[in-house]
Amino acid sequence: MKKNMLPAALSNRHIHLTEEDIEILFGRDYDLVKLRDLSQPGQYACEEKIDLVGPKGTIKGVRVLGPARTKTQVEISLADGFTLGIVPPVKDSGDVTGSPGIKIVGPKGELEIQEGLIAAARHIHINPDDAEAFGVVDGQRVKVRTFGFRALIFENVLIRLGDTSVLEMHVDIEEGNAAGLKNGDLVELIVD
């Protein structure tokens, strides 16, 4: 096996909600119901889903991820943007400044956020030990090579260092499909 190998994961559209927005969409004092844990510690997919309503169309059944956050953030693909009639900027997850808003509809209510709709930039979750072994630092941009018939090199992949992070590259479903990736496929981190 080549050095600097790590698993990849494809991320489908989803939403992170604040406690306040959870109550608006699902009801007062509502607690999200965990469906399954995600690869990153403390993160999980919820049973709850919402609908996104844009000027051109609606996307139904968008998965809620937990736990609650300090700011509501909607992560979609660029193709989802065409469906909704909104151009999502490609931004690092958590950076929603200047992004467009969207109408969010839940079973008990609806709301319109003024900003928070993005296409998440590709990134690598990594812990300090792996970062040292790979020779990378938090915030660095690297390249990642995929393998197989549709092999390609992803550029501008953000390193996201976290003490409890599990080593994994995240790309959205469109990027993963373009490279012929499946969850768990190994890719190679390239440091220039």
Image (cartoon, rainbow, N blue to C red):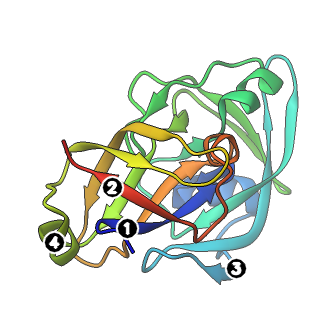
**Residue at 54% of width from left, 34% of height from top?**
118
**What amino acid does circle 3 point to?**
Val
Check disc 1 and report the residue beneath it: 5
Mark nearer the N terminus (4 vs 3): 3
Mark nearer the N terminus (3 vs 1): 1
SS at mark 4 in the image: helix
Q: Is residue 93 above or below residue 39?
A: above
Q: Which one is closest to the eye, mark 4 or mark 3?
A: 4
Residue 41 is drawn in which quadrant?
Answer: bottom left
Image quarter (top left, top right, bottom left or bottom right) of the N terminus:
bottom left
Check disc 4 and report the residue beneath it: 133
**Alpha carbon separation for disc pair 2 and 4:** 12 Å
Q: Which mark is residue 189?
A: 2
Mark nearer the N terminus (2 vs 1): 1
Relative image position of residue 150 (x, y in whole percent): 65, 44
Check disc 3 and report the residue beneath it: 33
SS at mark 3 in the image: loop
Q: Is residue 35 above or below residue 4?
A: below
Neighbor class of circle 1 (other Cα within 10 Å; few <14, some 14-19, many 20+) is some
**What amino acid does circle 1 point to?**
Met
